[in-house]
Image (cartoon, rainbow, N blue to C red):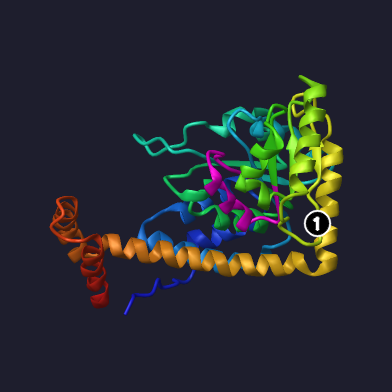
Amino acid sequence: MLHRVHEAPLLPEDAMLLKGVLAGERRALAKAITLIESSRADHRSRANALLKALLPHTGHSIRLGISGVPGVGKSTFIEALGIWLVEQGARLAVLAVDPSSSISGGSILGDKTRMELLAAREEAFIRPSPSAGSLGGVAEKTREAMLLAEAAGFNVVVVETVGVGQSETTVAGMVDMFILLQLPNAGDDLQAIKKGIVEVADCILINKADINPQAAAFACAQWKNALKMLRTASPHWLPPVLTVSAAQKEGLDIFWKEVLRFKCTLEASGEFQAKRKAQAVRWMWNLIDAGLRQQFDEHPLVKAELPGLSNSVENGKISPTAAAGQLLSYMQHV
């Protein structure tokens, strides 16, 4: 039988951490996220207790996922939008997931250094985290970090993803609204349809529209035509296609009106809360998959037999099916 991850009572330092997060202290929030990102068994137990205590204080933000190819201007757009939002009275948390260095394991792009103006605002919190090999353009603990940010009183949470492939759509499974940034020279309708990520987009933004307004308008029309041929993520919402210029801070107000209209539309249909409930269950299964894989990798018999079995598979001495079956059989003794 698989062992349980026990929930320890809050330690004194974690009780102080809880108090700091609920008070909206950015330093406490950063320390709490570091705790939940830790792979140490004792830290996982403490993190579970902290998350349990904070859970009643979550769920009050609007969650946005922002994706797009490198160079499209995701960080510039998020900083411009963030500054505009805090000036409107919002508190914004940005969970910027960077691709991990294969050497150090740390973040490569360093989004916090690219959002200096936003990072200086007390109403904003920016947390760059290495993806550490996780699929879907998100770090393993992105969802938990999002819940912590909500508990800290940030009413807008943005997840900026790596933006390097169609597995990027994983982020759409943990946010309310998924925004896809594109360049004016995105390509023709057929190329747009081939992009599977478009099918889960709730809004498409043509960024850098100030550089070539004519090309941006043309790209906007192309994307609108492409969307007519695709099944949208929600039956109650047709994704708008907008032109913006993050560098010139143009179109931010129009975009935010669409965000609020999206939220109101889905709340009226009952889809908003239903979507969040389904996402929570789906994330539970993602964690089950990750936990089982971790226990498999850490099993002493698997560690002992894996190199030899891998070599036998490579040399054709045993089938992959038989090797996998033998390794999995060891889990019966966990």
State the count of labels.
1
Q: Position of residue 304 (x, y in %)?
A: 15, 60
The answer to whether residue 212 shows anywhere in this view is yes
The reply to whether the magenta stretch includes residue 76 is no
Q: Position of residue 100 (x, y in %)?
A: 44, 38
Q: In the depicted view, which residue is nearer to us: 200 or 6?
A: 200
The answer to whether residue 78 shows anywhere in this view is no
Mark 1 highlights which residue?
A: 237
Q: Is residue 189 above or below residue 150?
A: above
Q: In the depicted view, which residue is nearer to us: 84 or 132?
A: 132
Q: Pointer 1: residues within 10 angstroms few (<14), some, or many (20+)? A: some
| Residue 176 placement: quadrant | bottom right
Q: Horizontally, is 122 left or right of 331 in the view? A: right
* Residue at the spot 67% in from the left edge and 65% down from the top edge: 276
Q: In the depicted view, which residue is nearer to us: 277 or 32?
A: 277
**Which quadrant does the C terminus fall into?**
bottom left
SS assignment at label 1: loop
* Residue at the spot 84% in from the left edge and 52% down from the top edge: 260
**Which quadrant does the N terminus fall into?**
bottom left
Q: In the depicted view, which residue is nearer to us: 45 or 135?
A: 135
* Residue at the spot 23% in from the left edge and 73% down from the top edge: 329
Q: Position of residue 326 (x, y in %)?
A: 20, 69
Q: Residue furthest top?
A: 211
Q: Position of residue 4 (x, y in %)?
A: 38, 75
Three-letter amino acid code at the position of disc 1: Trp
The magenta segment: 158-178
